[in-house]
Amino acid sequence: MAILIDDHTRLVVQGITGREGQFHTLRNRAYGTNVVAGVTPGKGGQDVEGIPVFDTVAEAVERTGANTSLIFVPARFAAGSVYEAADAGVGLAVCITEGIPVLDMVKATRYLKGTGTVLIGPNCPGLISPGKANVGIIPGEICAPGNVGLISRSGTLTYQIVGELTARGMGQSTCVGMGGDPVHGIGFVEALERFEADPQTEAVALIGEIGGSDEERAAEFVRDHLSKPVVAYVAGFSAPPGKRMGHAGAIITGSSGTAAAKAEAFEAVGVKVGRNPTEVAELLGRTLAR
Amino acid sequence: MSTLDVVSQAGGKPANFLDVGGGASADLMATSLEVVLSDPAVRSVLVNIFGGITRGELVAQGIIEALARVEVRVPIVVRLDGTNAEEGRRILEEAAHPRIVPAATMLDAARRAVELAHEEASG
């Protein structure tokens, strides 16, 4: 098992003929992901190193049975690509694109509620179920199959902590980058719910940062619904209030959204919080050794 | 942002914070370094990259370009991991610039950057 993607994933890449789209599609395929199609309007009939390109997602789904979509479309068209993926009936859409207008995402996430499509991102690294499938830009070589589930608001911190886990012999079931935007698809709660139900996952690493209240809601969910141990990390203890720190959603507003408040919320429900990425891996190591 | 936290934990005080974002090109990397180095308060520079969409060789080329464009008066500690990181590290090694200090891990890089900043300040 794993969550969201596995051996049954059949991937269509929207924006496959772009620079990043092509580079990462081929890396995902080299990892072993079953990349069945690409979409670029107007380039239907071409192929990218043998991967057939279609004009629409609907056509790609009909012809190849794609069930997951990866979006590398420029920001001003990206929300449209999310609608298109949903309308074509893919179960999971993963949007890597950074810089999509917040209002576009407010409308898109609302639209998805009436469909069977789950969104990851935008402004995210995608996700990987090591040994099974890699959908997005997470470097596959730093991961290993195992029993730690990981959910993160930061791409770089995902890599950092996955790297630390793998180096200590702790593999991962699925690593999900939920992205750094204030309005996004799957969050901590939705991922925790899936990890709790996934027999492969024995512990969860949760990587948060300043801004918003996703971490506080995650802490409540852990308290009420999780039997598996969770170790958390919160970036931004030294972040000044009122400044946007790298991600659109990473901002301390007034007295809320601070790293200290988030760490406290976790500790109050028995979730251990690492002071740095290395300590998160060490805490997980001790948790799993018990 | 986590980089700021580990610098603080290592006893340093970040002068500024520049997130190069996903998919930084060599030119963006070079310009970023120029901006950071323009602050006279800066005693050392920490470049901490674990690239997904960001490619290690482009980061390395950007650092080399910046070294050619501006006078670098402080040490630059570079920690490079992730996509094409090996190629990036090789480029930096071949350049063998006296101001470039390679570091293996994020925590090592933060400690080294803080140590060097203190040395610069006292020396």
Image (spheres, helix red, strand yellow):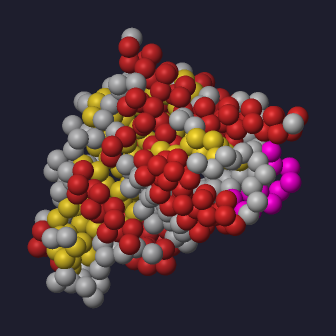
Relative vertical location of residue B88 with respect to residue A55 in this rendering, above or below: above
Q: Quadrant of the C terminus of chain B?
A: top right
Does residue B36 show up magenta in the picture?
yes
Find the residue positioned furthest to the top. A290
Q: Position of residue B95 (x, y in %)?
A: 56, 53
Horizontal side of residue A236 vs A37, given as left or right = right
**Residue drawn where x is 61% and y is 64% of the image:** B65
- Which of the 4 image quarters holds residue A249? bottom right
Q: Position of residue B87 (x, y in %)?
A: 43, 52
Relative vertical location of residue A234 with respect to residue A108 in this rendering, above or below: above
Find the residue positioned furthest to the left. A63
- Which of the 4 image quarters holds residue A185? bottom left
**Residue drawn where x is 40% and y is 63% of the image:** A95
Q: Relative to the observer, which residue lies in front, A171 or A199?
A: A171
Q: Position of residue A260 (x, y in %)?
A: 69, 34
Residue B93 appearing in the image:
yes
Horizontal side of residue B33 vs B105, given as left or right = right
**Residue drawn where x is 34% and y is 65% of the image:** A23
Q: Relative to the observer, which residue lies in front, B120 or A283?
A: B120
Residue numbers of the magenta segment = B33-43
Q: Position of residue B47 (x, y in %)?
A: 62, 48
Residue A195 appearing in the image:
no
Does residue A235 show up magenta in the picture?
no
Relative vertical location of residue A107 with respect to residue B84 in this rendering, above or below: below
- Which of the 4 image quarters holds residue B64? bottom right
Q: Relative to the observer, which residue lies in front, A203 or B33?
A: B33
Total numbered circles = 0
**Residue drawn where x is 68% and y is 34% of the image:** B112
